Amino acid sequence: MKRIAVIIFLYCFCTAAQVLHAGEVVSSSHLHFGFLKEEEDSLGVVITQNATYLMPGQMFEISIFSRCNAHYKIKEINIGEQPQEWKDEKVYTYGFPVVAVGNNNVPIHIQFVNAAGRTKQKSYYLAYTVGQANASVSLDKMNVLYTGIDNPISVAAAGGSYEKLAVSIVGGGGSIMKMGPGRYSVRVNTITDECIITVQVDDKIAGMSRFRVRQVPVPVGNIGGIESGDLVSRNAFLATSGVMAAMKDFPFDIHHEVTGFRLAIHRENGVTRTVTCKGALFSPEARKLMEDSLVPGNTVIIDNLFVKAPDGRERKLLPLVYYIRQD
């Protein structure tokens, strides 16, 4: 019987280890084995937690493993007095962001049932500690990180010199570069709501900050600084060299490269002539069309306007419309 008990224990331990994903290291002190004494060989669960020390906002994750050959099966699970939906699974995972600083524990109450309808209940308590954040991370220009550009940030930690700071980033495909004492530049390339910057002092976590990652807003096209919808004289329009793209009320100085557009001039008699241009400048063909057709009463339309964003993505802008007036 002892040999059988050892085999069953090793089976549970090995199967539980398979539940853990590569890179998610959990020490043996984090594993909680709970077996009901009445059914030592046929009833049990393995509960793991991803950490015992976290910072505010970090996720505390729990995995509950049900032994597949148990005579008793899990019927109900309550975590922190909240009932959880159990669908006769082999593994159940649950997580939440921690808030309360200090020592905490999560009560887990599991009710089991056998084929005869007999029920048993066992309680487990997972302990963890939430540390006090002693570091701050602030974005110098916005409260959002933008893809494809350098996002400047400032970092400070109470009681820690700038030389002792170690700053790292997870999420958003991010990377971080030190620019000076307490100053860093962040680059991200993937949109997400879970980009976390961690500050460590002497190899201990001093603070964590969560940021959103968004794409740079779509710019607006214009002709020589003239906004769409304006009345423009023939000479003023001919004085422009091509199409530009700019962003209003955006703190970063970002260049969007115009990769192409179509120039269309609609005459009062209903005839429309078009020329496609590559790049931002009016082509010689477009110049000739403008010379021939820019007369009062005609309408100029710039559409199929494309730009390349700083992150390399091509974006299509809204059409531009101009009305030719008398000089």
Image (cartoon, grey):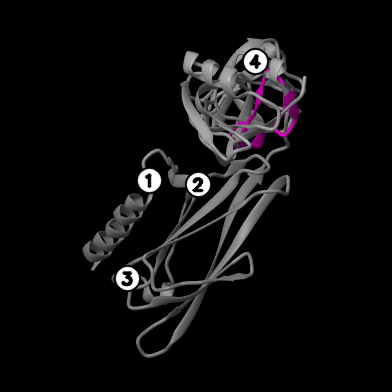
Q: Distance between the residues labelled 1 and 3?
A: 27 Å
Q: Mark 1 — residue?
A: 21
Q: Is residue 287 above or below residue 196?
A: above
Q: How crowded is mark 2: few (under 14 residues within 10 Å), some or many (20 or more)?
A: many
Dot 4 or dot 2: first in sequence order is: 2
Residue at 51% across / 55% down in the picture? 62
Q: Mark 4 — residue?
A: 238
Dot 4 or dot 1: first in sequence order is: 1
| Residue 197 tag number | none
Q: Are marks 4 and 1 in contact (CB under 8 Å)?
A: no
Residue at 38% across / 45% down in the picture? 21
Q: How crowded is mark 4: few (under 14 residues within 10 Å), some or many (20 or more)?
A: some
Dot 1 or dot 3: first in sequence order is: 1
Q: Mark 3 — residue?
A: 41
Q: How far apart are marks 4 and 1 (CA)?
A: 64 Å
Q: How far apart are marks 3 and 2 (CA)?
A: 27 Å
Q: Are marks 1 and 2 in contact (CB under 8 Å)?
A: no
Disc 4 residue type (three-letter)? Leu
Disc 2 residue type (three-letter)? Asn
Q: Is residue 287 magenta?
A: no
Stretch of the chain drawn in magenta: 208-232
Q: How far apart are marks 4 and 2 (CA)?
A: 66 Å
